[in-house]
Amino acid sequence: MLEVARQLSQPFDLQDLLSQIIDAGREILHADRGSVFLYDSKRKELYTVVAHGVKEIRFSIEKGIAGECARTRKVVNVPDCYADPRFNQEIDSKTGYRARCMIPAPLGGIDDELVGVMQLLNNESGRFDLQDESMAELIASQAASAIQRVKLQEDRIERLKLERELDVARRIQMGVLPKTLPTCPGYQLASFSEPAEQTGGDIFDVVPLPESYGIPGGLLMLLADATGHGVGPALSVTQVRAMLRIGVRLSATLEELFQHINAQLADDLSSDRFVTAFLGVIDPVKHQVIYVSGGQAPLLHYHAADNRCEWLDATTLPMGVMAEPPMDEVSPMAMKPGDMLVLLTDGIYEYQNPANVQFGSKRVGESVARNSREAPQHVMNQLLADLHVFAAGAPQADDITGLILKRAVEA
């Protein structure tokens, strides 16, 4: 037993460890075969991935002698399997092996957690005795601790691997965001993005328009938010950004950009997923923003002349909901001196404080109006500062992203 304990303390992967446990049990109890059934607590089943001569077997703990061992947490000594009504003959019929005598022992780990059942078959003397029961209990105790240790190690390795992959995904996603925002004559821009997890479902972009658009100094703005947050939504919004960039290179109109991206997402996304997106073209000559907003709302147009916040709705359904959604016709947004267009994802509007009260559009509007004479980056910073004061330490539950466009005040 001391040698078995020493061997089981060595580093193994789970499959090798289970093989070592079976071999140790067979040697000490002079058994012909052995199995280790691990316990699936969610399904309340025992299953084995290592057994001499068999493939995986899975069954309810309500069945068979091994199931009784798991339920009672006691060693069961069966001198004649086929004479015992508890014996589940299905396994023998599947494997072609005949069990004569059997001794299952529960694998009880730390905090009395059921790890599984070790089962040994066919002692060479014809039956297992009281000493075999004691030895089986001792082996099972050592084995349970070893299995828990290996599982913890494997879980930690898997978590570290996942964290590394998520870190790579985050760097890729953050890498596609503009390092610096392009300039636009007579306008200033500010941006912010912070995912709730390592990757997020929000994205923004600001793309200079090529000469083929006929809008000197014009820019295309994108703010998009995929349902949920994490790797899946991050892939969706990154796909939107990539298609948008290609569309601009091909000189697609604003409506064409939206329609083609939407149609592709309708093909790619499952029925419970979609992307809200604002696409807007800034014309610094006509001082207007032509836009399409697929489910992205509210949109805040701050009017400097009368210190007024105008809240605008989306113009069509979110991207990916249907291939050809109905689209409202809206007038271009006229940008007067000092006016701002404030685009924010719902992670800001719906941020909750400890009392489960949302930040809401009223507080957004008040913050923007209070800082309206400042540069847009200051407006953004103060809005985020107001948000964090309101949150009072409540954790960020959703991605938060924003874009602010401001027309300069004429001298």
Image (cartoon, grey):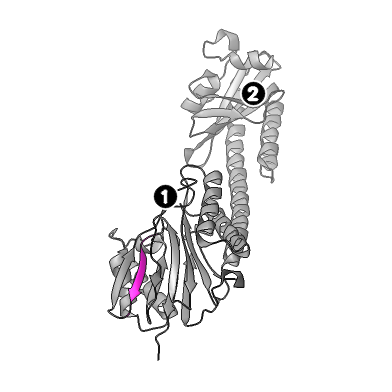
Compute the Cα span from label 2 to label 1: 68 Å
**Where is mark 1, residue-wise?**
326
**Which amino acid is tagged 2?**
Leu
Task: State the quadrant of the C terminus.
Answer: bottom left
Label 1, secondary structure: give it. Answer: loop
> Crowding at label 1, few (<14), some or many (≥20) Cα neighbours within 10 Å?
few
Q: Position of residue 219 (x, y in %)?
A: 53, 72
- Asked whether residue 129 is in view, the answer is no
Task: State the quadrant of the N terminus.
Answer: top right
Who comes first in sequence, dot 2 or dot 1? 2
Q: Position of residue 129 (x, y in %)?
A: 61, 19
The image shows residue 113, relative to residue 277, as above or below, that is: above
Q: What residue is shown at x 54% (from left), y 51% (from top)?
A: 232
**Which amino acid is tagged 1?**
Pro
Q: Is residue 269 left or right of residue 402?
A: right
The image shows residue 64, relative to residue 211, as above or below, that is: above
Q: Is residue 364 left or right of residue 151?
A: left
Region of the chain picked out in magenta, as a range: 297-304
Q: Say if the magenta span includes residue 299.
A: yes
Q: Position of residue 331 (x, y in %)?
A: 38, 65
Q: Say if the magenta span includes residue 136.
A: no
Q: Is residue 389 left or right of residue 206?
A: left
**Where is mark 2, residue-wise?**
120
